[in-house]
Image (tube, rainbow, N blue to C red):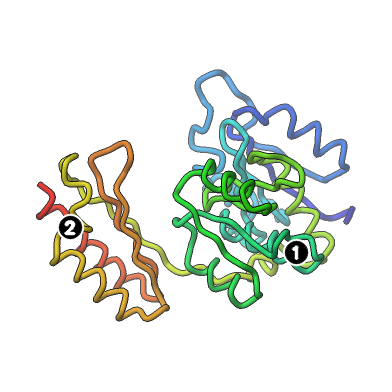
């Protein structure tokens, strides 16, 4: 273990508050821990993988090499690099996939993610010669695809990473140990390691519709033509993903591209069109 390597851990006042310390102590990792005083009601309260500001600040102010954040039940892990930038689930999957691919341990040379993963992850996979399979949103669909076809790595942008060689579900601590292991083996900074993949700007706008109009974006000619026109214009340098919420009267409009201002305008326009036709 590199003696001056320091990790900050945010346990979100949740399930990992006790076990994380035990594991990091056992492994001899130099760590400092925050948000590990659960009182029954402060789980995920302005902390953990869903609220990374405290961890980012702590990493920068204390000169940490890496920050790790779990969610309340401990199945997810996101990270913060040594410059305070977020290493999200897509970046973690790229790092893991590349490492396993180099070692000849990425089964069927395939990475599994959901349709919500960034276009950058797809481009990265293509450049590296890694097969990239996408599923519906939800880790259950990722796991189903992995089990069905014998893949061993998959996950979600949220930091829910499945490594079937070790575990059939997401495990935030396992994810963080794997990340640290790769970091130390490659002997690079966490910010350098995360540069392996370029993440495209991503905008998500919700369009409110009535429950019986959740398919309007497929059925209405004006909406579908606008979506097709935008996809053609982007010509592989962007992506449009429209999907209905399974639980709310919403249609989610997600657009990725190189120009954040442009894709924001387009997402708002398409969402407005959907709301106009869907109510």
230 versus 66 height, above or below: below
Kindly state the secondary structure of the residue where label 1 is placed. helix
99 versus 24 height, above or below: below
* 119 sits to left or right of 170: left
Q: Residue furthest top?
A: 40
Rendered location of residue 137, percent (x, y): 45, 48
Residue for point 65% across, 52% down: 59
Residue for point 61% across, 67% down: 131
Residue for point 45% across, 57% down: 115
**Residue ID for mark 2:** 219
Rendered location of residue 104, percent (x, y): 80, 65
- Is disc 2 surrounded by few (<14), some (14 to 19) or many (20+) residues within 10 Å? few
Q: Residue furthest front?
A: 148
121 versus 6 height, above or below: below
Query: Residue 99 — which label?
Result: 1
Camera-nearest residue between 10 and 117: 117
87 versus 123 height, above or below: above
User: Mark 2 or 1 closer to N-term?
Assistant: 1
Q: Is residue 135 visible?
A: yes
């Amino acid at each position: 273990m590199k003696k001056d390597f320091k990790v900050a851990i945010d346990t979100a006042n949740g399930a990992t508050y006790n076990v994380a310390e035990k594991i990091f102590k056992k492994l001899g990792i130099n760590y400092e821990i925050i948000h590990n005083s659960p009182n029954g009601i402060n789980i995920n309260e302005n902390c953990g993988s869903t609220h990374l500001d405290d961890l980012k600040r702590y990493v920068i102010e204390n000169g940490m090499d890496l920050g790790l954040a779990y969610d309340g039940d401990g199945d997810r892990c996101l990270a913060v690099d040594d410059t305070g930038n977020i290493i999200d689930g897509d970046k973690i999957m790229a790092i893991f996939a590349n490492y396993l691919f180099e070692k000849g341990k990425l089964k069927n040379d395939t990475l599994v993610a959901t349709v919500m993963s960034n276009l950058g992850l797809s481009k990265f996979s293509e450049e590296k010669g890694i097969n990239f399979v996408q599923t519906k949103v939800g880790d259950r669909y990722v796991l189903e695809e992995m089990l069905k076809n014998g893949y061993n790595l998959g996950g979600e942008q949220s930091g829910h990473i499945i490594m079937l060689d070790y575990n059939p579900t997401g495990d935030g601590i396992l994810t963080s140990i794997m990340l640290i292991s790769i970091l130390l083996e490659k002997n690079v900074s966490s910010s350098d390691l995360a540069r392996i993949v370029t993440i495209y700007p991503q905008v998500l706008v919700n369009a409110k519709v009535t429950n019986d109009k959740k398919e309007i974006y497929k059925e209405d000619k004006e909406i579908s033509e606008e979506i097709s026109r935008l996809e053609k214009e982007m010509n592989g340098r962007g992506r449009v993903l429209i999907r209905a919420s399974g639980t709310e009267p919403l249609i989610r409009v997600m657009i990725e591209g190189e120009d954040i201002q442009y894709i924001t305008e387009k997402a708002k326009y398409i969402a407005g069109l959907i709301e106009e036709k869907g109510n």
